[in-house]
Amino acid sequence: MEFENILVETKGRIQYITINRENKLNALNQFTLAELHDAFTRAFKNEAVGGVIITGAGTKAFVAGADITEFQGKDVDGGRRIAYEGQSKVFDAIANGNKPVIAAVNGFALGGGLELAMACHIRVASDNAKMGLPEVTLGLIPGYGGTQRLTQLIGRGKALEMIMTADMLTAAEALQLGLVNHVVFQADLIAKAEEIMDKILSRAPLAIAAAIRAVNDAQTDGVNGFDTEIEEFARCFGTADFKEGVAAFLEKRKPEFKGK
Ligand code: COA
C-alpha cells in the first residue's frame, strides 16, 4: 500500500502497521495520523485481515508523542480541531474497531504515543519501554483520549499523578498498574503479540467484535453496558459461527469459524 510514514504488511490474517519516522522517534504528525486513519479503515473493512499489530520503527520508540513542531502557532480553535479530529478519526476508531488491535510498545510511548497504545485493545511492552503523558510540561493536557483512557485503565489517583507530574513509568511499573498486559524482552515483543493475536484469531470473529463493543460500553457515558451485553449476546445466536461452535463442542472436534 502506498503510505509514506507508515509501513503496512500482512502475514496470514495479521496486519502489521509500523509507524515509520524513526529519526523523529515516530512522532505523530497530522500526515501520519491521516495515514493511520486510512490504514485502519481499510484493515477493518478487509475480510482477509483478522487483527492488527501496531508498533514503531526501530528499537528506541513506539511513538514519542504528537509532533510538537505542529503545535506551534495554534489557537484555541486549532487545538480543539487537533483533539477532535484525532480522537474521532484515529483513537476512537481503533478502540471501537471490529477487529482486535494489539500495541507492541517497543520503547518510548509518550503523550499521543501512550494514547495510541491505550486506544488499542491489548498492550504488550518490551522491557525497555517507558510510558508517560508529559503534556503538562508543554502547557497542555492529553488531547487524544489520555485523560479518560488512563483513568479507566489505572484509576483516578494514579492517572492524576502520572498526568500532573509528567513522570514516566518503566515497563515493570506499567505492568504492575495494569497499563500493559505483558512485558517481554524486546527481541520477543512481536512474537508475544502474535501469540496473543493467533489465539484470538482462532476464536469466532463476530463474537470477538461483539466482545469489543460490549466491553467498550462498560465505559460509554449514557449507555448501560449490561443492556449492550444482552443485545450482543442475543445477536451471536443468529450467527453460523455460534451453531458451528456448539456443534463442534458436542462432536468433540475443533470448530471451523467463518466469521458469519
Ligand atoms: N515531536 C516532534 N519531534 C520529536 C518528538 C515529538 N513529540 N519527540 C522526539 N522528537 C524528535 C526530536 O526533536 C529529535 O529530532 P532532531 O534530531 O531533528 O532534533 C529526534 O526526535 C530524536 O529525539 P531526541 O530528543 O534527540 O532523543 P532523546 O533520546 O534525547 O530523548 C525523548 C528522547 C523521548 C525523552 C525526547 O525526544 C522527548 O522528550 N520527546 C518529546 C516527548 C513529549 O513531550 N511527547 C508529548 C508530546 S504531546
Image: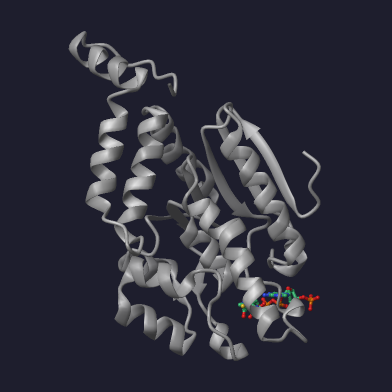
Up the image or down, 110 lies above or below 42; here it is below
Q: Residue at x 65, y 79 (%)?
A: 79
Nearest the viewer among 217 and 68 is: 217
Residue extending furthest toward the left: 250
Where's residue 225, x and y in %?
Answer: 27, 53
- With 180 as the anchor, is 18 left or right in this view? right
- With 245 as the anchor, is 188 left or right in this view? right
- State which quadrant residue 229 falls in: top left
Residue extending furthest toward the top: 251
Q: Which quadrant is the N terminus positioned in?
A: top right
Residue extending furthest toward the front: 222
Where's residue 132, x and y in %?
Answer: 50, 75
Q: Residue at x 44, y 24 (%)?
A: 259
Q: Which quadrant is the C terminus positioned in?
A: top left
Up the image or down, 154 lies above or below 243; here it is below
Q: Residue at x 60, y 72 (%)?
A: 83
Query: Visible in this render: residue 36?
Result: yes
Q: Residue at x 71, y 86 (%)?
A: 75
Where's residue 113, x and y in %?
Answer: 58, 66
Up the image or down, 111 lies above or below 204; here it is below
Nearest the viewer among 79 and 224 is: 224
**Ligand 1 sits in quadrant:** bottom right
Where's residue 47, x and y in %?
Answer: 57, 27
Up the image or down, 16 lies above or below 147; here it is above
- With 32 as the anchor, is 47 left or right in this view? left
Query: Visible in this render: residue 108?
Result: no
